[in-house]
Image (cartoon, grey):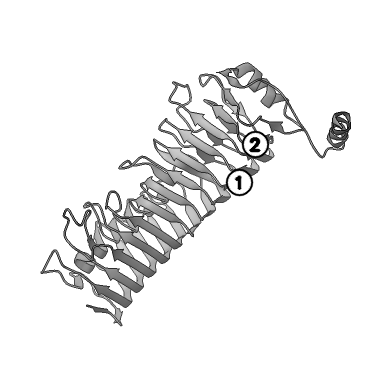
Amino acid sequence: MKRLFLLLLSLLAASGQIYVKNFAACNGAVEHAALVAAFAAATNEPLIFQPNKTCVFDPTQLRIDISGKTIIAEGATLKNGYYAVTGGSSTNWTGGTLLQDGTTDNFNSPKILATGGTGLRFTGLTCTNATSYACFQLSGANNVWIDKPDIFQAGLNSITITQGKHIHITNGRMKGTPGGSDDGIAIVDGGGDVQDVVIANMTGEDIYDILKIVNVTNTVRDVSVTGCTGTNVVAPLYIQTSGAVATNNISLSGCNFFDTTGSMAENLVRYAISGGATVRNVKVNNVTFRGRTYPVNNSIAQITNTGATIDGLEVTGLRWDDIYNGAANGGSAPGYPANMGFVYSASGAAAASNIKLDSWFINGTATYAIRVTSPITNFSVWNMYGKNLYKTNPTGTLVSVTAGSIDEFHNTWIR
């Protein structure tokens, strides 16, 4: 039977249907040269790592180029390795744990850095990173799919995007440090324009945001976040753009967030935009929060505009449920109620237009449901319902507009 199995295996390999490659022992010792040689040799066949083995790289050596290769590492651990995709097509990596234990290295950069190439797919990778850099950085690769990632990031970002198109990040988890400032998926400067990013069914825990956009020189457009869940997330959607650049067509929908002790949560949506930036057509729909907040900048939708332009913001179908019904902080009610529902403030040559709030349910805010201190053109509020408001501030009111006006105000009540 054994001879028959080996014969069948060789026939399958010869037909191009199956490839098996053995290389280093991967016994927990540093085997850098053998591992590099194995990657280099995997040109027309996949590189398969043995399960339950730990392969150790020398992190001070050059990054390993995996462009166009197929890697199968299910059940294996790859320690202190750094990998690059620089071009080509059809790079595939399935399974395995990428472990960085804090060993000094020469890269100060992500575990996987994709500066080029198209048709990249990473499936089921676990990434534990003890350095202050991302697990993945996409800086020029297109048509990328990262599916089922499980990332623990005790540093900066789980995934960084500086340039690229047609990127999907789906069905995974991003975990940071409790009380820390670890970002989830960050779109930042450093490459070129970013377009068509789909983030779906991701879970965030103890992180600053699910999506953060920090662009000064590159245009960002067509980015969607759907079906996500977060526990102890400061601001799930955070747009922090400056410079004369455009950020267009951003959406957050069908997501649920929780923070039962108010350890980190501050907002559901936050803008901190400046420097002539333009943010157009942002939509937040069917998003819920249940819990309490941390007492800093803690308004549900907090929009701060310093010399930038907002054209189009819709926040609809929002439910904010304070689990202690707006009670003050205390032993039986940890955390704090949200300070305000929607707050807009501006300075400098700022402009805002076409903002719509529709179908909000708010249980518990400290001061205002709506607070506007700078003009908004075409500002409408529909179907806003609230209860247990102003418990900690008897002078609070439903609406405070000190500049400009609400153009349409319909079907709004509190109890």
| Other-residue count near label 1 (Cα within 10 Å), few / some / many at <14 / 14–19 / ≥20 | many
Rate crowding at label 2 as few (under 14), some (14 to 19) or many (20 or more) other CA atoms within 10 Å.
Answer: many
Tell me if I can see residue 296 in this picture: yes
Residue 396 lies, in percent from the top left, at 14, 69
Q: Is residue 411 left or right of residue 97?
A: left
- Type of residue at label 1? Asn
Label 1, secondary structure: give it: strand
Q: Quadrant of the C terminus?
A: bottom left
Residue at left offset 19%, top offset 70%: 400
Question: Which residue in the rendered view is the most extreme toward the left?
Answer: 395
Q: Is residue 7 above or below residue 305?
A: above
In the rendered structure, the answer to whether residue 134 lies left or right of residue 30 reads left
Whether residue 376 can be seen here: no
Q: Position of residue 337 (x, y in %)?
A: 22, 60
Report which residue position mark 1 lands on. Answer: 142
User: Which label's residue is closer to the chain start, 2 or 1?
Assistant: 2
Q: Residue at x 59, y 24 (%)?
A: 55
**Which of the two residues, 184 or 77, is positioned nearer the viewer here?**
77
Q: Which residue is mark 2?
A: 87
**What residue lies at 26% left-to-right and 73% top-to-bottom?**
386
Q: Amino acid at mark 2?
A: Gly
Q: CA distance from mark 2 to mark 1?
A: 10 Å
Q: Which mark is residue 3?
A: none
Between 224 and 360, the one nearer to me in the picture: 360
Q: Residue at x 30, y 65 (%)?
A: 321
